[in-house]
Image (cartoon, rainbow, N blue to C red):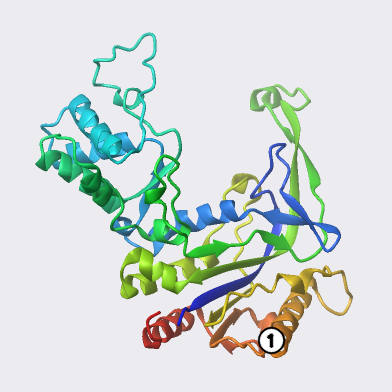
Amino acid sequence: MTLYIDVHALHTLPPNNINRDDTGAPKTATFGGVPRQRVSSQAWKRAIRKDFPTYLSQDKLGTRTKRVVEKTVTKIRELDGSWETARAAEAVEAVFDAARITTSRPKPKKDQDPADDEEPKELLGETSYLLFLSTHQIERVARHVIEHDGAKPSKKDAQKLLDEEHSVDIAMFGRMVADSPNYNVDAAVQVAHALGTSAAEPEFDYYTAVDDVVEEADETGAGMIGTVQMMSSTLYRYATVNMAQLEKNLASREAATEAAKAFVQAFVTSMPTGKQNAFANRTMPEAVVVSLRSDRPVSWVNAFEEPVVDSLEENRRSQAARKLAAEAAQIAEIYDAPAEKTWVMAIAPLQEALSAVGTQVSRKQLLDELESALATEEPA
């Protein structure tokens, strides 16, 4: 039986611009015929990934970079300081070449000697795209280079070095290798774009900056003026974890369970960093619902196809919670497909509205009960 962990959240943000488009404006989307604030799934996935070190040790995580050669050369020199950078780089590039992953060296700057080992970053091979490698995979390549004195491995050996012992973030969010699709990893996690539950449009903040020296001279006027766009919304956030795929990617049910717990925690606590210094919009979700399903993932976003509106009787957060609970109940009833288990974390004003959705728990209770539930289910 394949298990899915669905994570839903209502998350209110004060004025913010955590995810902006190419013009600097907060991202938006039209849903239900009205514009809403939107935070892209890519932005929040990165925020979740950057939050993983809070819950997982670094050796269970990976690095996504074009500078894979530099990263591996650094590890080689950590393990064996006798290796010169240039020699190590040639050996590492040979490993990636054997794996059919193309690297190329940037041209040296006009005033830089290519033989100068003091600034190796400009001279080491880079991929033309971001490559996701686990800490273990980088170390395996480094150790192979040292143990085989830089000899180029076979294609089969190179593939073993780069396609086993995936990190949690690779297992969850997947990996695509343009040069060699054999190294692709199917993602076990899907994250939806966060969407405002009510209609909203960007507003403009007109700001000025005062010149301290001018001010001390009793002169008037601003040293700089400008505008920045912002929005404020209660967002509906949703993600789902395919436990069978996660277990396959990590080759361990125990590792998959640990990863799933870390994901739920990071989903709750993470925040994209756009314009944080300007707005400090560091709120926590007011409601989080986690469902364990054995049929298929189910988003409740259509609860907000008709947007939440101002009301004298009920604030927007409470309305959103009530609409979310109604959508969950109707889907479960109409399709005769209730979740195996559902837990709810919510602040007091929203607990009553969500009481019928699932068991009210604290974060610790949620994580403990989720771990227990995953441990007692039969493997897929």
> Outermost residue toward the right?
312
> Is 128 located above or below residue 317 in the figure?
above
> Residue 367: image x %, image y %?
44, 79
Q: Which image quadrant is residue 296 in?
A: bottom right
Disc 1 crowd rating (10 Å Cα; few below 14, some 14-19, many 20+) is few
Q: Which residue is mark 1?
A: 335
- Identify the element where label 1 is drawn: loop
Instruction: Give the residue drawn at x 65%, y 48%.
Output: 19
Q: Is residue 131 left or right of residue 84?
A: right
> Residue 245: image x %, image y %?
43, 68
Instruction: Give the residue drawn at x 40%, y 34%.
Output: 127
> Residue 289: image x %, image y %?
59, 78
Instruction: Give the residue drawn at x 55%, y 69%.
Output: 240
Q: Which image quadrant is residue 250 in?
A: bottom left
Q: Is residue 7 left or right of residue 167?
A: right
**Towards the viewer: 62 or 251:** 251
> Outermost residue toward the top?
111
Q: Of the residues shown, which amino acid type is indicated by label 1?
A: Tyr
Instruction: Give the residue drawn at x 71%, y 70%.
Output: 301
**Towards the viewer: 134 or 13:** 134
